[in-house]
Image (tube, helix red, strand yellow):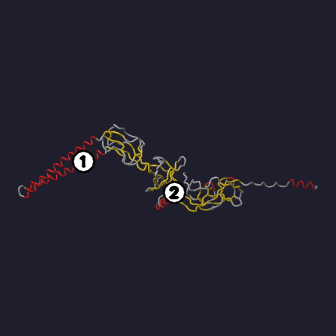
Amino acid sequence: MAIGTWSLAKDWFKPPPKAVIPPIPVVVAVAQTGDVPVYFSGLGSVQAYNTVTIHARVNGTLDKVVFIEGQDVKAGDLLAQIDPRPYQAQLDQVTAAKARDEALLANARLDLQRYDRLASQNSIAMQQRDTQTALVAQDAATVKNDQAQIDYAAIQLLYTAIRSPIAGRTGVRMIDAGNIVQTTDTAGLVVVTQIEPISVLFSLPEDDFEMVNRQMAAGALVVAASSRADNKILGKGTVLLINNQIDQTTGTIQLKATFPNHDHALWPGQFVDVQLLVETRHGAITVPAAAVQRGPQGVYAYVVTDDDKAQIVPIKVSTANPGAPVALIESGVTAGQRVVVDGQLKLRAGASVKPSAAAAPLSASTPQSQ
């Protein structure tokens, strides 16, 4: 074979050059350290701090209804008025009876003084004086009974003015003026609901009880309530109590929190998401939650090295703040390392990457609803 022909054949069978794989574009964020609040999440229901159904305490005709439905009232405000005339007449009657009995008592005491002088002179029998003494005591008891009757009649007259026992908001009027009201009526006149402050009942898994109980013994626990529709924070309050037993059917413990509710953002019967702040971990390492990956070997994250290579690193994530935008890292990632938060599907260990910074800053300070 000619030399020229062999050279051409050698060039023909030469393997093609390997294709250069371009760096994989990924979005990265830097692991940070800081004070991380730890929240327990639950579903809560809003309840009125106090609810009172207003009933009539005396029978009679409802002369007038003073309140307006949906009106805010204070404790002691007049809500309705029952015809007071029968009760005023009864009070006048027992008052007059007392005046009569007081006059009889005064006369009996004067007679007793005369009998005492005559008895000292042996002018009358001792039995007559003793009888007069007993009469004075009887008349005195009658006057005391009259006073009790006056007090009772005055209370009955007072009850004709129906007043609110608490501060709150009135509901729908259940009876109109002109009707006869009875103390035995079950419906009542109106329901007054106290919504400032207001309560929220919520439940947590029984596994959280020990930590919550320990932290509550150290001080008041802060609770945030947010709407279920848009996660808007509706108010912040404090835990009032942990229920005295665990519900064995659901494996949960019930808690009650109190909210000032000055803006009336919370309403009785409303369902809300609850975030209970149990502690703040200082110097904790956090990464965006999107950086946490799960595989057959466990939980891991892609860390970008100084030479822009992807490295798989096993990590341990705290169970605190599930569903939050950031993950609390207990081990595996150190502060300042770059972790991949987007583009992991195309990655493998040792792959070259073209990192770009995450658009949103890393934050762990705001409670997140589930």
Mark 1 or mark 2: whose residue is earlier in sequence = 1
- 223 vs 70, nearest the viewer: 70
State which mark lies toward you, 1 or 2: 1
Give percent across and percent down for residue 237: 48, 54
Name the residue type under label 2: Leu
Please state which of residues 77 and 235 is positioned toward the viewer in this rendering.
77
Q: Kindly state the secondary structure of the residue where label 2 is placed.
A: strand
- Above or below, 123 against 100 in this view is below
Kind of residue at disc 1: Ile
Q: Residues within 10 Å of mark 2 (few under 14, many from 20)?
A: many
Mark 1 residue crowding within 10 angstroms, few (<14) / some (14–19) / many (20+): many
The residue that disc 1 covers is: 150
What is the x, y in percent for residue 30? 64, 58
x then y, percent, for residue 187: 37, 42
Per the rendering, the mark at residue 277 is: 2
Disc 1 element: helix
Decide which of 192, 215 is in the foreground and name it: 192
283 relative position to 197: left or right: right
Residue at the (85%, 55%) spot, across then down: 14
